[in-house]
């Protein structure tokens, strides 16, 4: 077993334990903190996959913005769902069943796929990747339209969030 | 060298954990957290496929960037809706949000 595989296994176990804790812990603040650990684990996977840029934006966007937003929302709505009463639906076993069935289906399809155990090819020009990605996002022949649509979506989301959550003056 | 299968199995498990959270949790904010887990596993899959199957192109990374943007917008609007509902009804339980139920 190489060092890379060892790192993978450790990070995967920590990330999955944190992910299970996100969906099972009673206190919402604890859930948000476990979510941060999960997002860090995923960022390490991006590094292992030679996509360091994504590790950086994972930390900046997900941990810096989204997880903090979750913590704010959990604090703003704190009084209602305190540590009393069940945190899950009465038919939680159905959720477990559906999740297990979905995993079994995904595993079945993956195992029958011939490229399942393929190993990574040598990465050509790894340092020019960010350059290539930046050019692809603004090139008219590639992804300029989805890129601009994403910016419109972000503006719409921002204005919508301010409009919906803002105080209404009568 | 890590085979592709490890990443795919990891992402499948993370997706199923997120799905369980979405289906089972009562608190609407916890449901959004489950959706975040699912989106993260999708991104791991996209980057893994990019690295292992088509590392000459850039399509997988471009897809992942768009998923990041959509996730950020989704969380902002979703949490704004939850806070707005909390102001009116003092509840964040997803079962209580039934005013549009017919």
Image (tube, coloured by chain):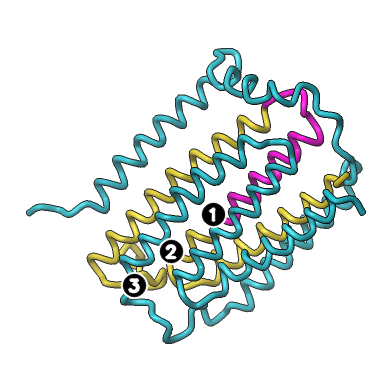
Chain colours: A cyan, B yellow
* Whole-percent x, y for residue A54 in the image: 61, 38
Q: Residue furthest bottom?
A: A84
The residue carrying mark 3 is A78
Badge 1 marks a residue whose secondary structure is helix
B101 sits left or right of A51 in the view: left
- Which badge, 2 or 1, is on the more N-terminal residue? 2
A5 sits left or right of A90 in the view: right
Quadrant in which the C terminus of chain A appears: bottom left
Instruction: Give the magenta part as a residue range.
Output: B36-58
Please tell me if label 1 and label 3 are on a single chain: no
Q: Nearer the viewer, mark 1 or mark 3?
A: 3
The residue carrying mark 2 is B29
Chain letter belonging to callout 1: B
Up-down relation of residue A9 to residue A26 (above or below): above
Tag 1–tag 3 contact (CB < 8 Å): no
Graded by Cα atoms within 10 Å as few (under 14), some (14 to 19) or many (20 or more), the crowding at tag 1 reads many
**Res A135 quadrant in image:** top right
Chain letter belonging to callout 3: A
Q: Nearer the viewer, mark 3 or mark 2?
A: 3
Q: CA distance from mark 3 to mark 2?
A: 11 Å
Up-down relation of residue B81 to residue A47 (above or below): below
> Residue visible at 70% across and 24% down?
A127
B61 sits left or right of A83 in the view: right
**Res A159 quadrant in image:** top left
Graded by Cα atoms within 10 Å as few (under 14), some (14 to 19) or many (20 or more), the crowding at tag 3 reads some
> Residue visible at 61% across and 50% down?
B40
Chain letter belonging to callout 2: B
**On residue B36, which mark appears?**
1
């Amino acid at each position: 077993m190489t060092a890379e595989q060892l790192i993978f296994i450790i990070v995967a176990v920590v990330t999955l334990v944190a992910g299970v804790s996100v969906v099972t812990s009673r206190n919402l603040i604890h859930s948000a903190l476990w979510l941060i650990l999960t997002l860090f684990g995923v960022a390490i996977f991006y590094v292992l996959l030679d996509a360091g840029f994504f590790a950086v934006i994972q930390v900046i966007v997900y941990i810096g913005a989204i997880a903090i937003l979750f913590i704010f929302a959990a604090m703003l709505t704190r009084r209602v769902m305190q540590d009393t009463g069940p945190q899950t639906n009465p038919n939680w076993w159905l959720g477990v069943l559906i999740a297990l069935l979905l995993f079994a289906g995904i595993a079945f399809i993956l195992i029958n796929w011939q490229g399942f155990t393929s190993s990574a090819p040598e990465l050509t020009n790894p340092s020019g990747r960010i350059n290539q990605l930046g050019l692809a996002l603004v090139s008219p022949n590639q992804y300029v339209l989805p890129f601009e649509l994403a910016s419109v979506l972000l503006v719409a989301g921002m204005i919508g969030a301010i409009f919906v959550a803002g105080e209404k003056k009568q | 060298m890590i085979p592709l299968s490890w990443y795919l199995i990891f992402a499948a498990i993370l997706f199923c954990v997120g799905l369980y959270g979405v289906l089972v949790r009562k608190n609407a904010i916890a449901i959004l957290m489950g959706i975040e887990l699912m989106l993260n596993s999708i991104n791991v899959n996209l980057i893994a496929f990019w690295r292992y199957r088509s590392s000459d192109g850039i399509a997988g990374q471009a897809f992942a960037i768009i998923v990041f943007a959509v996730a950020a917008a989704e969380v902002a609007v979703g949490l704004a809706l939850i806070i707005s509902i909390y102001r009116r009804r003092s509840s964040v339980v997803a079962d209580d949000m039934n005013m549009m139920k017919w």
